Image (spheres, rainbow, N blue to C red):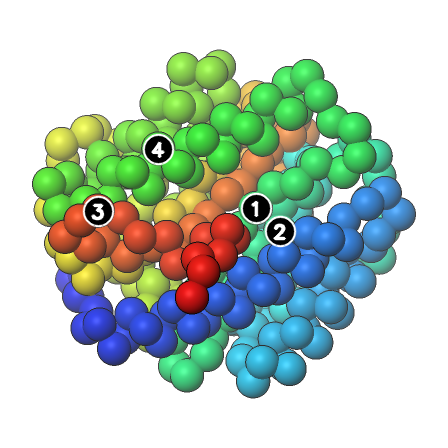
């Protein structure tokens, strides 16, 4: 069952999403060759604590860090390490926050220093795949229109989608129904309704879609060790269309 949120609940999600955005903006500003993922994690923890919020990830099924940092062939769930980021890396940062009982979840992939060619194209295509998918989140559409949009953008650009991990409903829990795969048949799945809230996740691999989990029990890497990118937004379906709650371009108020 997909839970429809009240306007009051959506306001609470808006608050947690704003904190996630604040964290992401600061982490983004720290990114340069030589910075360590573990430093990003510590900074994220400090900001989340200062805002009176809580990391949605820390302790989740025993996850040991506050954020996920996935570098190059790492797909998702990278545990932040002490190793320095290097020029030419692509780095996916995933931030999840709980505030006043409601969750916000977002991810962005960034280029460290100069990144070009196929790696840069992968990042751009994944960003566009998420934006295509979010566009589908409106009452005249069905759930797998969102999924299909991600797959379509990936495949038409010669890339593949991750099949073993999914986007998800979100609200008073980090993970709610439904699961939102990165592939699907358009025009199928549950009808979308105003008040549904989703964490839509585009996860795209340059090579094969196959992934495996590292011995740390968390870090997911591509089987062929080619790069992967990840963009995620928390959104709400409204009568007028999608609203992105984890938007980094701040609305004036
Ligand atoms: Co998520």
Q: In terms of sequence position, does the residue under pointer 4 or pointer 2 come before the other?
A: 2
Answer yes or no: do the residues labelled 2 and 3 have beta carbons within 8 Å?
no
Q: Is residue 31 left or right of residue 153?
A: right
29 in relation to 39, above or below = above
| 57 or 192, nearer to the observer | 192
The residue indicated by pointer 4 is 132
Q: How far across and how far down the image is residue 252, in percent? A: 45, 60
| Badge nearest the viewer, 4 or 2 | 4
Mark 3 within 8 Å of ligand 1, using the beta carbon: no
2 or 3: tag closer to the N-terminus: 2
Give me the residue at 29% from left, 38% from top. Answer: 135
Distance from label 2 to label 1 (Cα)?
6 Å
- Work out how far the residue at label 3 is from the one at label 4, CA to CA, in angstroms: 13 Å
**Residue appearing at x 53%, y 41% in the figure:** 230
Say which label, 1 or 4, has the lower sequence index: 1
The residue where tag 2 is placed is 93
Quickly name the residue at label 1: 108
Q: Is residue 215 visible?
A: no
- The answer to which image quadrant residue 68 occupies is bottom right
Kindly report which numbered mark, 2 or 3, lies closer to the viewer in this rendering.
Answer: 3
Q: Residues within 10 Å of mark 2 (few under 14, many from 20)?
A: many
Which residue matches tag 3? Answer: 241
Is the Cβ of the residue at disc 2 closer than 8 Å to that at disc 1? yes
In the displayed structure image, the side of residue 154 where residue 66 appears, left or right? right
CA distance separating discs 2 and 3: 27 Å
Q: For residue 216, what is the image quadrant?
A: bottom right
* The C terminus, quarter of image: bottom left
Q: Nearer the viewer, mark 3 or mark 1?
A: 3
For the N terminus, which image quadrant? bottom left
Tag 4's secondary structure?
A: helix
């Amino acid at each position: 069952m997909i839970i429809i949120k009240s306007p009051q609940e959506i306001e609470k999600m808006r608050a947690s999403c704003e904190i996630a955005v604040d964290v992401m903006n600061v982490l983004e500003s720290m990114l340069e060759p030589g910075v360590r993922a573990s430093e990003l994690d510590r900074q994220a923890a400090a900001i989340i604590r200062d805002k009176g919020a809580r990391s949605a990830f820390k302790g989740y099924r025993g996850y040991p860090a506050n954020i996920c940092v996935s570098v190059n062939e790492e797909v998702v769930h990278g545990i932040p390490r002490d190793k320095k980021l290097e020029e030419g890396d692509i780095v996916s940062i995933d931030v999840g926050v709980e505030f006043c009982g409601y969750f916000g979840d977002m991810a962005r992939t960034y280029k460290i220093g100069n990144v070009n060619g196929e790696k840069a194209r992968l990042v751009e295509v994944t960003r566009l795949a998420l934006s295509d998918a979010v566009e589908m989140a409106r009452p005249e559409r069905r759930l797998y229109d969102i999924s299909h949009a991600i797959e379509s953008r990936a495949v038409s650009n010669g890339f593949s989608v991750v099949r073993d991990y999914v986007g998800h409903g979100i609200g008073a829990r980090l993970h709610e129904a439904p699961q939102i795969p990165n592939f699907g048949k358009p025009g199928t799945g549950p009808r979308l309704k105003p008040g549904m809230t989703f964490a839509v996740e585009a996860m795209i691999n340059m090579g094969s879609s196959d992934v495996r989990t590292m011995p740390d029990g968390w870090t997911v890497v591509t089987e062929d060790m080619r790069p992967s990118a990840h963009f995620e937004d928390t959104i709400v379906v409204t009568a007028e269309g999608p609203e992105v709650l984890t938007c980094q371009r701040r609305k004036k108020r």
